[in-house]
């Protein structure tokens, strides 16, 4: 079974090229990327936090965490632009 997933055009293009070069399907690459990402400490920390907050109904904590992450991502993108790097 599979599902349709929307990704930014740039990501889609890069994955298409990588899949052709590596003789894999785009689904294989996405699956592998997800498997690797969900093992990262950042993801595990966020996931555990969200599970606990949802279990206790602490929606304020979830909103605060999402806001904190959004500000951190915006600051990282701004720094990349200032330094002439491509924002992620």
Image (spheres, helix red, strand yellow):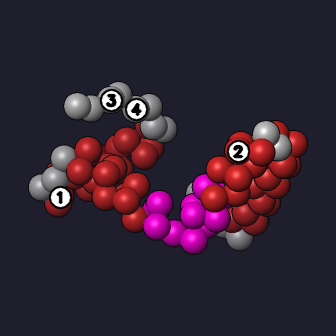
Which residue is identified by label 3? 3
Look at the image and give the residue range highlighted in magenta.
Answer: 37-47
Quadrant into which the C terminus falls: bottom right
Residue placed most toward the observer, 67 or 16: 67
Name the secondary structure under disc 2: helix
Quadrant in which residue 43 is drawn: bottom right
> Disc 2 or disc 3, which is closer to the eye?
2
> Disc 4 or disc 1, which is closer to the eye?
4
Q: Is 45 in the magenta?
A: yes
Which residue is identified by label 1? 21
Q: CA distance from mark 4 to mark 2?
A: 28 Å
Quadrant into which the N terminus falls: top left
Residue placed most toward the observer, 51 or 8: 51
Q: Are marks 1 and 3 in contact (CB under 8 Å)?
A: no
Q: Are marks 1 and 2 in contact (CB under 8 Å)?
A: no
Name the secondary structure under disc 4: loop
Between disc 1 and disc 3, whose residue precedes? 3
Residue at image point 71% right, 70% down: 83
Q: CA distance from mark 4 to mark 1?
A: 22 Å
Between disc 4 and disc 1, whose residue precedes? 4
Q: Are marks 4 and 3 in contact (CB under 8 Å)?
A: yes
Residue at image point 70% right, 57% down: 49
């Amino acid at each position: 079974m599979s599902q349709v997933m929307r990704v930014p055009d740039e990501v889609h293009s890069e994955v298409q090229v990588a899949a052709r070069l590596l003789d894999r399907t785009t689904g294989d690459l996405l699956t592998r990327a997800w498997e690797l990402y969900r093992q990262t400490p950042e993801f595990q920390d966020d996931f555990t936090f969200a599970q606990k907050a949802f279990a206790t109904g602490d929606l304020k904590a979830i909103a605060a965490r999402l806001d904190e992450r959004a500000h951190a991502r915006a600051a990282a993108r701004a720094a990349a632009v200032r330094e002439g790097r491509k924002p992620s």
